[in-house]
């Protein structure tokens, strides 16, 4: 088990586009395991490989009661409706912003056995999937936020 260091906003790597995974190597499997440990330790809703300094198209999303889903080369293949809710990110500690996202998304990805699967999620699950897949293209939620919470609002939130 290894807890990886999560890079923050100041690190220009967060703005880079991640490369596809062509082959599931032992290194990729170790990365998935370490990302899982890191996500649990950080108590986050999701984690993209770029956030631990690896520019590969890999993301983990916490889904329905602590179930963590591993997504390799994920792609959004369908979007329905819209929702606007608060969003945060492990790479932007103590910040929150309002972001519009689809209400429901369907994602196609590969699992650690190299098998393709599709996943449809609504609400928080859809939000987390969009957020993590954005990371793989160097996009952070702040770029899309209609507004960020003010220090006063944050203070109220953490009270
Ligand atoms: Co994030």
Image: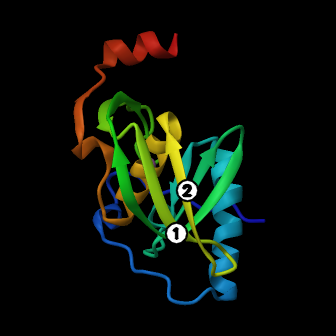
Where is residue 156, by image quadrant? top left
Which residue is pictured at 38% across the width and 61% down the height? 77
Where is residue 134, by image quadrant? bottom left
Question: Which of the labelled discs sits on residue 109, or is there none?
Answer: 1
Query: Label 1: few (<14), some or many (≥20) within 10 Å?
Result: many
Give the left or right position of residue 132, taking residue 151 as reference.
right
Q: Are marks 2 and 1 in contact (CB under 8 Å)?
A: yes
Where is residue 99, by image quadrant? top left
Q: Viewer-proximal residue, 159 or 86? A: 86
Residue 15, percent across and down? 28, 63
Which residue is pictured at 33% across the width and 37% down the height? 81
- Say above or below: 63 vs 57: above
> How much space separates mark 2 and mark 1, taking CA atoms?
8 Å
Q: Which residue is mark 2?
A: 119
Residue 33, percent across and down? 71, 67
- Say above or below: 43 vs 132: above
Query: Label 2: few (<14), some or many (≥20) within 10 Å?
Result: some
Tag 2, which secondary structure?
strand
Q: Viewer-proximal residue, 4 or 122? A: 122
């Amino acid at each position: 088990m290894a807890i990886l260091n999560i890079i923050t906003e100041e690190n220009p790597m967060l703005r880079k586009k991640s490369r596809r995974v062509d082959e599931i190597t032992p290194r990729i499997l170790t990365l998935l395991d370490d990302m899982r440990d890191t996500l649990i330790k950080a108590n986050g809703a999701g984690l993209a490989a770029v956030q631990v300094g690896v520019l590969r198209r890999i993301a983990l999303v916490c889904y329905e009661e602590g179930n963590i889903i591993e997504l390799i080369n994920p792609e959004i293949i369908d979007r329905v409706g819209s929702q606007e809710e608060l969003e945060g990110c492990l790479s932007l500690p103590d910040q929150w912003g309002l972001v519009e996202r689809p209400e429901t998304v369907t994602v196609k990805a590969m699992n650690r056995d190299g098998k393709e699967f599709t996943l449809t999620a609504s609400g928080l699950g859809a939000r987390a999937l969009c957020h993590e897949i954005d990371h793989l293209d160097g996009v952070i939620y702040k770029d899309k936020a209609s507004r960020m919470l003010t220090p006063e609002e944050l203070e109220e939130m953490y009270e």
